[in-house]
Amino acid sequence: MSGEPVLRVREVRKSFGDHAALDGVSLEVREGEVVTVIGPSGSGKSTLVRCVHQLEAIDGGAMYLDGELLGHEFHRGHLRPLPARKVAAQRSRMGMVFQQFNLFAHWSVLRNLTEPQVLVHGTPVEKAREEALRLLERVGLSDKAQAHPRQLSGGQQQRVAIARALATNPRIMLFDEPTSALDPELVDEVLSVVRDLAGGGMTMIIVTHEMSFAREVADRCVFMEKGRVVETGTPEEIFEHPRSPRLRAFLSRFSGRAAETPHDRVLEEETAS
């Protein structure tokens, strides 16, 4: 990991009505870095990756992909929103894997992978097909190319969704709790694919509620609460030496350990309420 960050998020704010989903979030992700984002429900984790992918418009702050401002451009000395086609071009440089699989049910698995390459990037059909088959082999589904999503398990559908996101050769992969919609017995088959990507040097932000996985796969972990980044550090720092009472209270729910001080226990009760 070296050089300029692939992604920079600077003081980003996003509200839904009176609720501040993101309240001045700043984050950097460097080439080849895997950043896992953890925190309680409603902390802003999913909103963060949705804003990076420009599925939600931010209310303030700025985001940069390889130094390019996302979502806006300068025009005659002023910032203005990018037109939809330019937003789509920026979005195509990022791969997004959602909680739900979002596959086209009436298309085969192979077509779900080839169409984005052909339509978004203008890849020749045969080359797109070759890349799709390569990616299906990578996620362990080379025998499912002609199947339709309804014929696959949830874990298989999510692996297809990962392959589809990889098909456009993204600069960064964004995962929004990719196992939350899966039955427990199907979770590990998806996580093993993500582990493989991490081992191959893919730049990634992974929002997850799987604590052991978040610790195992990350170069850096981010703990969010109430729309803010509360603490960031290496997996060892976050999971073994948490500094903030909020993070200690959050982790105690997964470890079964009580909060370390009476004050921490009060904060834990407040967080749960």
Image: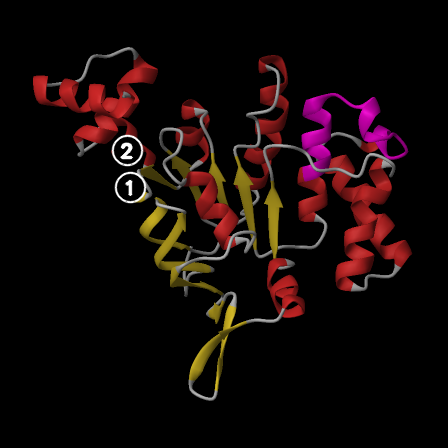
Q: Which residue is located at x 85 percent, y 49 percent?
A: 130
Q: Amino acid at mark 1?
A: Gly
Q: Position of residue 183 (x, y in %)?
A: 61, 16
Q: Position of residue 45 (x, y in %)?
A: 42, 39
Locate residue 92 relative to residue 106 in the image: left or right: left
The foreground one among 145 and 1 is 145
Inspect the magenta stretch and tell me whether residue 150 lies in it.
yes
- Name the mark on residue 46: none
Dot 1: element = strand
Dot 2: element = helix
Outermost bottom residue: 76
Q: Main secondary structure of the magenta part?
A: helix
Outermost front residue: 17
Which residue is labeled 1 in the image?
233
Locate residue 181 relative to residue 115 in the image: left or right: left
The foreground one among 134 and 101 is 101
Q: Which residue is located at x 73 percent, y 35 percent?
A: 160
- Name the mark on residue 238: 2
Locate the N terminus by quadrant. bottom left
Task: Confirm or deny contact between disc 1 and disc 2 (CB under 8 A).
Answer: yes
Q: Amino acid at mark 2?
A: Ile
Inspect the magenta stretch and tell me whether residue 251 lies in it.
no
Q: Quadrant of residue 223?
A: top left
User: Which span of residues is magenta-colored?
Assistant: 143-161
Locate residue 131 relative to residue 100 in the image: left or right: right
